[in-house]
Amino acid sequence: MRLFFIFFLSFAVRAETSKPIYLSSQEKALLALSFKIHSLEKEQQKWLWTQLKQSFQSQVLPEKIEVRSFDEFLSQENQVKWFSEHSVADLNVHDLAAMLSRRLYFSQKKSVQAQIQDYYHRKQELRYSVLSYLQSEATQMSGALMNLDIQKIQQQVNEKLQELSEKSLLPLNDLKHSVHAKIIAKLIKGYYRSLPIEQKMELVYRVAQMPYPSGSLDVLLVLIQNSGPQFQKFLQIMGRHDDLPIEIRRLFQKLENSVQEVPWWKVQLLLKSDSSFGEFDYFAEKPIGVGTMAQAHIAGFRGKKVVVRFLKPGVEEKLKIDHQILKKLTQSIDNDEELKPFKLPSLSKVIDDINESVVEELDIDQTIRNQLKAREIYISEMLIAFDQQKNFIHLVVPEAFKVNPKSKLMLQELVSGQKPAREFENFRDIYPNLYRVVAEKISQLWVDRAFFTSGFFHADLHQGNMLAMVTDDAIFVYFLDFGMVGALDNHLRKSALLLAVGTKINHSSLIARQFLSLDKHKRSESFKKEFQKAIEEKIVEIQKQGRRNQSLEEWTAWAINFGLDLNYEFLKLNRGLLAIDTLLMDARSKEDLNSISQKVALNHKISYLKLLLEDQTLELGHYFDIGKEAVKTPERRPRRNNLSQCARIFN
């Protein structure tokens, strides 16, 4: 047993060989049992102790198992899939105890047998290479298990997880001038230090299943993949900044497509407990989409293929734990003297906004209502011209429904396609401007609906929430995932439009008045004067930097940092604007939100002009400025280095 714990504690040490080594199923079972003791009743603990004692004192010869290939040996020796599909809490003590018996694998093929022997030899060398350094730690942990010293095991888990999180941050340690690297390091260390012991055990258990050697970033990815959904979303936001190394940014981008999926056996339990289960013709085992909050599978329903979306089991409890931990952490970071010179927006408010957004996504019925509303507003057909070609683009929102009111499953018609960038890349040699033209049309439609017609908008229309398909007859773009939408009433639409005008022409009083109208609190006259003065100083600073103006998103982040508590629908609007702006940049469009908005405004010139004329602070010269802005070449903003709360509150 001592050798097992020495080996377990050594996974952060890199082996000389490039061939991976794993814990055996026996070693994984022993590790899981040491964690399971924490939750067992006294009688179960005594039974387990008897099983452990018999297993390690038994003189029975090991069971011999023949394998035909080295891959078969690895699969049986490690049972990687079985362990990865079960959390510590899910594992049955009796199943684990049955795995403690010794097994000896062999092959009649000489080449396979040589590989098996070499594997065991390398594994033994790795154990002894760290013996002198880890012997005291291993003795303490194995002794704690043998004596059922639960507190000692918990202490070892705490220390191991702290060591893991610190080692995983090695790529960030040299980035002394990166404020976001500092924040991420503080968040990761503080988060893993604050988790309940059960979640800490689960994380250590997950990392212990990794192959050896594993790099620091690989360890960090596994830790985050198995963490809470709110923490994952926050890191996705933080990980987009340019002052982070490319490998860190790529790691956080992976979270959008590689979070931990709910295993099939657990999906089956969820389905069987749902009132609509008997209605399905079949249900695909492999998911087609896995997010931080939900998972989706293809299924047959009354002779048709559909997509079934459901919330991950236990997600609500994890959200509560995450919010409690992150709220305390971000409050501490907001007051950190080392970070105050950077004048960042309040991270504590960022966490509140993330929490509000993810809580919205928990309501499946509301998501369905959002999607049905979006079908009324977004479905359209437009003629587009590109590369001396013309074609129709169909913007489609799939139908969504539930089998019955009591069901927790959301059904959606199955649509085909790929992410826009990937789909249009296939046609770039023939139609190099196709993606750009489609992105601009989508952006115009989004701005039109949000600002000038319904006020309803998709607040997260990024690539992951769209599918595209190019056919001979038409181009289809499907809008997906309406868990986060916004709705602007007339007052909010007018305020947002006038604020956008104010930021374009650097009109300090217009900016101040519209921001204050969007604030949730009634402010004193002294606060209003101070806010107005700060805006004037900010405009002078912008002009000194040689910039024409600052984006609405940047102004909003600045206002929040000043202390405004802005309307949540307006914050979601900013998130939506960021997603659309990112779509335009991905498509390499020369247009930006300013130029797109001006084109849409011209289609509503009467109502737009009426809105401008109603404002008493705009003078004749300002209308000339607005006109000049409308005809200027779009000015691409520099890549964002400041954390913008309003626009980055979702993944």
Image: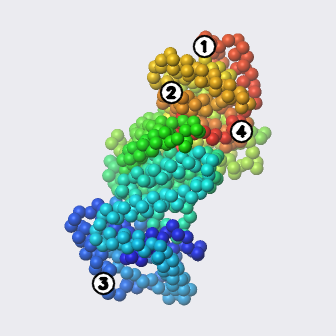
Q: Which mark is residue 121?
A: none
27 left or right, relative to 42 = right
C-alpha gap between disc 4 and disc 1: 33 Å
Up the image or down, 367 lies above or below 279; here it is: above
Asked if residue 286 shows in the view, the reply is no
Viewer-proximal residue, 437 or 517?
A: 517
User: Closer to the N terminus: mark 4 or mark 1?
Assistant: 4
Q: Secondary structure at mark 2?
A: loop
C-alpha gap between disc 3 and disc 1: 88 Å
Viewer-proximal residue, 309 or 414?
A: 309
Q: Secondary structure at mark 4?
A: loop
Q: For label 3, count other residues whose C-alpha is less than 10 Å away and answer few (under 14), some (14-19) or many (20+).
A: few
Q: Which mark is residue 58?
A: 3
- Dot 4 corresponds to which residue? 589
Up the image or down, 328 lies above or below 3; here it is: above
User: Closer to the N terminus: mark 2 or mark 1?
Assistant: 2
C-alpha gap between disc 4 and disc 2: 33 Å
- Dot 2 corresponds to which residue? 564
Marks 2, 1: nearer the viewer? 2
- Dot 1 corresponds to which residue? 615
